[in-house]
Amino acid sequence: MSMGDILYRMGEAVDSGIWWLRGLVLPVPSKKPPSFRYLRGLIRRNLTVHEFLSLTLQLAFVLYLIINLTLLLLRVSMLWILLIAPPYFLYIRYILVRNREFFLEPEPYRMFYYWISAISFVSFAGYVVIRRVATTVYYYIGYLTVILGVILLFRYYFKSRYGRDWTYGTVEEVRGDIARVFVHDDLAANVKPGYYWVDAVPDAEPGRVVKLLIENRTLKGAVPVRILEVYLIDQSSQTEAEPKEEME
């Protein structure tokens, strides 16, 4: 390979890197959903685009927590906590902005992950500071109490602004007096994705969208318990309110 070829490839690599970095820092909404090539290889379930996006955010947040906890155990300097934060926040923002059109309800996810990530960053950074000045265990107890209070206040604010006692589902099957519905991951309703059995109602035919009353259960999240409304549309009508969208 000649020197000219080497320089040309180096230029291409630099140019690609600049475009990649620009897309990460200044993301724009995409018209095409991501492929999730690696996640599809790991998750052997028929998830929708919305579910994969939610799972991506969850994994990124958990990884961020694990890395920071490891850094705290290693008793590293504050610099490491500060260096880890920007790539994580940029990635979270990229996922939320780039794929905004493919979240069924993007605003609760945006608000939740921005704020819970910010609280986590402040918690880790603050712990490093407390560790330097603490003279007794009461410093740590007081600090953890404050952090817990902040988390509870955020939970209350989030539920008061976005929380609701209903969600949408798609009827998959009807067996006599009961119906099997598919429900997306719904952060505002605190419902996990999956299939749920509820009492059947008139017009609740397979493929139709239904509005479901949910019931909160301690340590288990919320679960659909009853059909409130039936919409005379089916899966082929790709509406904003529809809980089951196409995978591709």
Image (cartoon, rainbow, N blue to C red):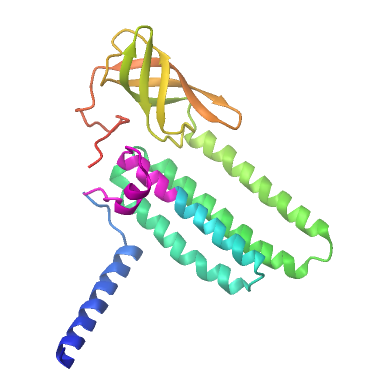
Residue at image x 37%, y 11%?
200
Residue 47 found in image quarter: top left
> In what quadrant of the picture does the C terminus appear?
top left
Looking at the image, residue 73 sits to the left or right of residue 9; the answer is right
Please state the horizontal and vertical placement of residue 138, each as a whole percent of the image. 82, 56
> In what quadrant of the picture does the N terminus appear?
bottom left
Q: Is residue 127 above or below residue 146?
A: below
Residue at image x 15%, y 86%?
5
Please state the horizontal and vertical placement of residue 207, each as a whole percent of the image. 25, 21
Residue 42 among magenta residues: yes
Residue 192 among magenta residues: no
Please state the horizontal and vertical placement of residue 159, each as a whole percent of the image. 53, 35
Residue 140 found in image quarter: bottom right
The segment highlighted magenta reads: 32-57
Comparing 232 with 182, the one in front is 182
Residue lying furthest right in this view?
136
- Total marks in image: 0
Q: Is residue 149 above or below residue 18?
A: above
Q: Is residue 127 above or below residue 36?
A: below
